[in-house]
Image: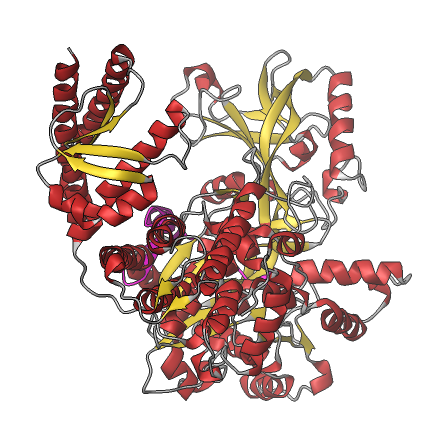
Amino acid sequence: MSLATKYNPAEAEAKWYAYWMANGFFSSKVDPAKEPYTIVIPPPNVTGVLHMGHMLNNTIQDVLIRKARMQGKNACWVPGTDHASIATEAKVVSMLKERGIDKKSITREEFLKYAWEWKEKYGGIILEQLKKLGASCDWDRTKFTMDPDLSDAVISVFVDLYNKGKIYRGVRMVNWDPQGKTALSDDEVIMKEISSKLYYIRYQIEGSEAEYLTIATTRPETIMADVAICINPNDPRFAHLKGKKAIIPLINRAIPIIEDEYVDMEFGTGCLKVTPAHDVNDYELGIKHKLPVIDILNDDGKLNEKAQILVGEDRFIARKKIGKLLDEIGQLEKIEDYKSNVGHSERTDAVIEPKLSLQWFLKMEEITKPALSAVMDDVIQLYPPKFKNMYRAWMENVRDWCISRQLWWGHQIPAFYLPNGEFVVAKTKETALEIANAKFGTNFTIEELKQDEDVLDTWFSSWLWPISVFDTEVFSTGKPNEDLKYYYPTNDLVTAPEILFFWVARMIIAGYEYLGEKPFKNVYLTGIVRDKLGRKMSKSLGNSPDPLDLIANYGADGVRTGMLFSSPAGNDLPFDEKLVEQGRNFANKIWNAFRLVKGWEIDENASGDANTASIDWFENRFQQALAEIEDHFDKFRISDALMATYKLVWDDFCSWYLEMIKPAYQQPIDRPTLDKTIVFFEDILKILHPFMPFLTEELWQQMRKRSTAEALIISSWPTAKSFDEKPIAEASQVFEVVSQVRNTRNAKGISPKESLSLAINTKHPGLYQKFEAVLKKLANLSELQFGEKVDNAISFVVKSDECFIPMAAEVDVEKERENLSKELEYTKGFLATVMKKLENERFVSSAPAAVVETERKKQADAEAKIKALEESLAKLS
């Protein structure tokens, strides 16, 4: 069989993805005879294109789904996209601007027509890109959060929660985006450290010509909205001011001086201006002390008439002008440079304003309780579990959820306003009319009902995702369909920690509210992909490679493994393109190993007796590695599972096993050894497949003639069997001897082609005799002897065995003593490290028994080696 010298990823990727799709290997149907394994994709924004975070997240999901499929489970990975209200609306507004159309000049219906046009043109890009990565989603199940049936589910839920008294309309403090002119949820606010100014402003005490209170603020433009000055009741500096008033500069309005222990006496000047309309903490303080609220900013961030001065000015221009005006009247004490964390809109990058606004809210205090218990009691497990404390902190201090957005793209709130100033909530306008007329005894017409202009927060649809992708009618009927009964709860969710509260927690809440059941069993939280300097990858920094370029240059398998080489759960991934290069090199190594095996001629008459020990070793080593890999998967250590696989394939199979059984140059191999080697190779391809699907399918199909029903993607995951550690330990000892001989050659400049003799002083000669053929072959030995010390020889110690390589020339005894002393010092240091672990009671009591046992074995081996080295040194004295 002719096999290309180099692996061509692009050719294999196109061929096998089309093959998998054509044969329906990704699709899943309800099958009671099979155990379901379900993942729902965190729906990327419909505006999105593939970035490095998507690459990591979706690679992990694909690894999990492919492994489950091979384990015989009914694997179902549901893909889809999120309508992303703010981001999409911004894209559509930008598109309209390019066409010379102002959003304000068209109707809502016209705008939505353009929005759907944009979605149809650009909305599927990211899903197509995921196919390049090898994502084995059930594409027939692709969902969009504004599909008619999913939209109907969202409206049903709003109406249901409103009727239960859990949704209300009220004036509350929200995050306001003055550029997008909409409220935002907390997760849509990005905190950035910026350089600003700290203004020290003097407020004159009412009735006094000379006494002032100095207050430091970064926002002098809001002083016209001040309603009080707050001091700490325990602060002796201001005790004489209790009950007095201060005068706001420039507008000369008197405001009370109040007391509250909330004020930090050590921060700033020790007193605080209270502006309830423009600061979240001030708002809470205002409620507590029953203070009035004066909102001086319009929705676009400009000063309104209530400001009394600088009306119509932008907030940042007003800030500078206020500073100058205060300075002119002598009430600006000083200005200092200051760094502070300021919230910015994720989509428009505008500085967020805390703003009192009439919005729709979902009461969160009661509805969150089952979701909190589920995670705290490990009904739902977070990986890594360190995120449990963060989850608890948020859930125990949760605020009511602002669910309305001042946009047109999204699910329009099903509230209908009546001519009498009241409103009703209903799924349709017709139903709303019936309710209104029955409730108020009126005879309104349908034309008189005006639907709320706002849309729902995007998360209000995606929190239903694990349910609505299977069944949209359950929210109104309460009766789950067959799909939902079978696939729900899903198994694993893979997502980013930054949306743990805003999406993950809310899905858990919805799951218990509507089905009384968790939406998933496990949540794997990935880290953030960062560059080598530790910066988060972003377009603005220009530090993020194009994932599709990486795939084109290194192959999808190379990129997948490169992403996973250093991405433990919950920890950030310090991305380096060298990792992807390592992934590509790994693919080439496997390709070349396959070429080697398939290139051997076969001697049908030869026995495989010479390779019995080698086969026995690898059989046991494979099972040992498989157990380790399974353990890593069970604990969601996906990166560790890959590294264990990598070491098995690169080190054990390619570097040792194939060399052990490889026939001499231009000589044939025996049939039993080749057949067993192909079985090993097939098992290796199976455990590699979830990580490297394209290369493995290519080699699997070339290994032997296969039917479609025998495709690797649906083949059986290797069966775990018990293994014998003895041949593994014996081979390991032989490999160390080989390595030491090779090191000696390098140190002494002896050619690998020159055969050497080796003498071993050991109590276990049978171990070396078992692997004698391997030892002679790999170390190029002409002779293997057993006995005591050999004169004029280079010596080294493996475990407790002394090894001697006789030299023709005189051996430098001092040099030998120096080398043995260095090795002794190193081994003692190694033993000290091991003992430090074993003397740690916490480690011994909490670490898995197998891990502790491994450390004890390291201790025993090190102690035996130290004894042998000391004896060798004594003989040189």
- Residue 865 lies left or right of residue 590; in this view the side is left
Tell me the colour scheme of the image: secondary structure
Q: Quadrant of residue 223?
A: top right
Q: Is residue 466 above or below residue 870?
A: below
Residue 396 inside the magenta-drawn segment: yes
- Residue 60 lies left or right of residue 760; in this view the side is right
- Residue 553 lies left or right of residue 389; in this view the side is right
All told, the count of numbered labels is 0
Q: Nearer the viewer, residue 45 or 110?
A: 45
Q: Residue furthest left?
A: 763
Residue 148 horizontal/vertical position (percent): 61, 81
Residue 94 horizontal/vertical position (percent): 80, 58
Residue drawn 31% across and 18% down?
Answer: 809
Is residue 794 visible to us here?
Answer: yes
Is residue 406 visible to us here?
Answer: no
Q: Is residue 462 above or below residue 52?
A: below
Residue drawn 61% across and 15% down?
Answer: 208
Q: Quadrant of residue 412?
A: bottom right
Q: Quadrant of the C terminus?
A: top left
Q: Nearer the viewer, residue 438 or 166?
A: 166
Residue drawn 28% across and 42% down?
Answer: 735
Residue 9 horizontal/vertical position (percent): 60, 61
| Residue range corresponding to the magenta coloring | 378-406
Q: Nearer the viewer, residue 520 or 577?
A: 577
Q: Residue furthest right?
A: 100
Residue drawn 28% across and 54% down?
Answer: 628
